[in-house]
Amino acid sequence: MRPQQAVSSVVPSDELPQHPRAGRANWLHIVLIAATIALGSSVAGVLVYNWYFDSVIVGLSSSLQPISDAFHNLGASHVRQPSPRPGN
C-alpha cells in the first residue's frame, strides 16, 4: 500500500471568499487610525505643555523671585542718581 498524502488545510488565496470593498475598507481604517493617533498626540502635547508651563516654569520663577529681587536691588544701587541742579 502506498502511504496516503497529507491533505493540506491551506486554501489558495484565489479560492478564498473576498468582500468586494475589503481593500477600500482597509485603506479607510488606516487613514482613520492615523488621524486618531495624530489628534491624540496633539491633545497630549498641549496637555503636557500646559502642565510643564504651569508646574515647572511658573514654579521655578516664583521660587527664584527673591534671588531676582536681590540682584535687581544690587544693580539699582550702582546706578547714579542725577545730582539736583543748584537753585538760582
Image (cartoon, grey):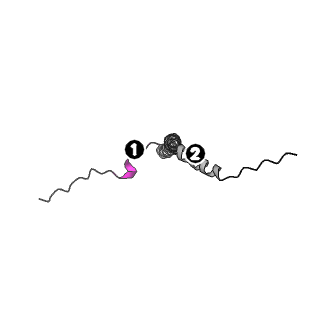
The residue pinned by badge 2 equals: 69
Name which residue lies at 64% across and 50% down.
77
For the point 37% across and 49% down, the residue is: 15
| Residue at point 60%, 47% (across, down) | 73
Magenta-tinted stretch: 11-19
Residue where numbered disc 1 is placed: 17
**Amino acid, disc 2:** Asp
| Residue 22 lies in the magenta-colored region | no
Q: Residue 43, image x and y in percent?
A: 52, 40
Identified at 60% across, 50% down, the residue is 74
Q: Camera-side residue: 3 or 52?
A: 52
Measured from the top left, where is residue 18 in percent x and y?
42, 44
Q: Which of the two discs, 2 and 1, sits closer to the camera? A: 2
The three-letter code of the residue at mark 1 reads Pro
15 drawn magenta: yes
Q: Residues within 10 Å of mark 1 (few under 14, many from 20)?
A: few
Can you give x and y, in whole percent of width and height, for residue 70 in the image?
56, 47
